[in-house]
Image (spheres, helix red, strand yellow):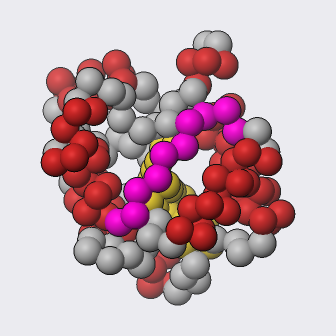
């Protein structure tokens, strides 16, 4: 597999514009080659993944390879979005990394119980966030296999 085959999109869902900017900066600093897109809440996320509303024009585009999800957001929080995504045969294959400020044990347990692939407490300093982004990139891009669009399509046909 060439490196270009691993250029799936990371989708970060976070209502805090400063956190989104810091994450983008960290991705640039560690030279993460994967495209990164941003949404602001769980409602947008579910519409984006289902290609509804303002995202209907993306129907022919591949789904993100990884979702980075904050828990505490308006409209539909990360817990609700996580539960809805993992209940969907069309979407549950997408790895979801909870990236949040909460260290609450109940949030950690419920996130894994709802199907999160990882739970990371969001660092506030850029250098620490760069280490997290670098680790995410190494693990999810270089080590594990993430289903591509064709493989995800095959999964939908099996279900």
Placement of 54 over or under 153, stated as above or below: below
Q: Which residues are magenta?
A: 32-41
| Residue 51 percent across, percent down from the top left | 21, 40
Q: Residue furthest top?
A: 2
- Residue drawn at 64 percent across, 53 percent down: 24
Placement of 32 over or under 71, stated as above or below: above
| Residue 123 percent across, percent down from the top left | 70, 72
Q: Quadrant of residue 59?
A: top left
- Residue drawn at 77 percent across, 72 percent down: 125
Instruction: Please state, as top left, top right, bottom left or bottom right, where the N terminus lies in the image.
Output: top right
Placement of 57 over or under 117, stated as above or below: above
Q: Quadrant of residue 43?
A: bottom left
Q: Quadrant of residue 35?
A: top right
Query: Could you tell me if residue 82 is visible in this image?
Result: yes
Magenta span includes 34: yes
Placement of 152 over or under 88, stated as above or below: above
**With 103 as the anchor, is 137 left or right in this view?**
right
- Residue drawn at 17 percent across, 32 percent down: 159
- Residue drawn at 29 percent across, 58 percent down: 44
| Residue 6 percent across, percent down from the top left | 58, 25
Q: Nearer the viewer, residue 154 or 10?
A: 10
**With 14 as the anchor, is 76 left or right in this view?**
left
């Amino acid at each position: 597999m060439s490196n270009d085959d691993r250029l799936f999109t990371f989708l970060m869902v976070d209502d805090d514009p400063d956190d989104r900017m810091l994450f983008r900066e960290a991705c640039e600093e560690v030279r993460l080659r994967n495209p990164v897109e941003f949404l602001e809440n769980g409602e947008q996320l579910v519409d984006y993944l289902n290609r509804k509303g303002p995202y209907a024009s993306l129907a022919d585009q591949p789904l993100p390879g990884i979702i980075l999800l904050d828990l505490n957001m308006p409209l539909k929080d990360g817990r609700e979005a996580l539960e809805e995504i993992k209940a969907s045969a069309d979407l549950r294959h997408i790895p979801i990394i909870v990236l949040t400020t909460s260290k609450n044990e109940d949030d950690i347990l419920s996130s894994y119980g709802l199907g999160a692939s990882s739970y990371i407490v969001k660092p506030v300093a850029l250098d620490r966030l760069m280490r997290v982004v670098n680790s995410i990139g190494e693990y999810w891009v270089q080590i594990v296999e993430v289903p591509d669009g064709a493989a995800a399509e095959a999964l939908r046909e099996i279900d």
